[in-house]
Image (cartoon, grey):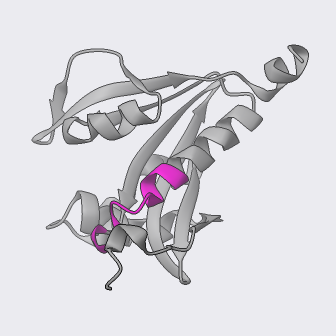
Amino acid sequence: MPIANSEIERPKPVIEQIRPEHTWQLRRDVLYPGMTKHEMEMEEDADGMHFGAFTDNKLAGVISLFQHGDEYQFRKLAVNTAMQNNGIGSILLKYVIKHVEDDGGKRIWCNARTNAIGFYLKLGFTKTGEPFTKNGISYVIMQKWLTPLSDQQESV
């Protein structure tokens, strides 16, 4: 009897910190097809942390994280289209959320594409305002309030 795709055991991706330029190809391929890879560089890339999810030693997903005091913004979450719907984006974002919590962050947020609102809601994010459009793409700010590790230890 054939095994359904949903029953196949998939290896959990390995998350590593990566250099900003290693995010550009996936950013372009997934989020901005039609633009050049060089256009994916953001001025603030040098100030952020960048993470990659690897499956079978291949970069499957990327996310960039920027600290502003005790708040963090993540940007450019992208998963290889051939590997989407396998939990890679959720694993990558949960990893970043834990990193922010461990670092004492109180809030994490993003400008979410409106077609991804459901993804963020499942991970405990809430909408904070009305949708807006930038470069022809509709977004809404999504946020999640966190309990820093220091506060968790005090309540034990």
Q: Is residue 89 magenta?
A: yes
Asked whether residue 101 appears in the rendered view, the answer is: yes
- The majority secondary structure of the magenta stretch comes to helix
Dividing the picture into quarters, in which one does residue 117 lie? top left
Between 120 and 33, the one lying in front of the other is 120
Q: Is residue 95 above or below residue 72?
A: below
4 sits to left or right of 77: left
> Total number of numbered labels?
0
Q: Is residue 74 magenta?
A: no
Q: Residue at x 34, y 33 (%)?
A: 111
Position in image of residue 76 (x %, y %):
38, 51
Q: Residue at x 35, y 80 (%)?
A: 3
Q: Residue at x 56, y 68 (%)?
A: 13
Q: Which residues are magenta?
A: 81-91
Position in image of residue 109 (x %, y %):
46, 29
Q: Quadrant of the C terminus?
A: top right
- Residue at the front extreme? 1
27 sits to left or right of 57: left
Q: Residue at x 32, y 74 (%)?
A: 4
110 sits to left or right of 107: left
Between 46 and 107, the one lying in front of the other is 107
Q: Quadrant of the N terminus?
A: bottom left
Q: Is residue 79 above or below residue 3?
A: above
Position in image of residue 124 (x %, y %):
47, 28
Between 116 and 78, the one lying in front of the other is 116
28 sits to left or right of 62: left
Asked whether residue 83 appears in the rendered view, the answer is: no
Q: Is residue 49 above or below residue 73?
A: below
Position in image of residue 61 (x %, y %):
44, 64
Dividing the picture into quarters, in which one does residue 141 lie? top left
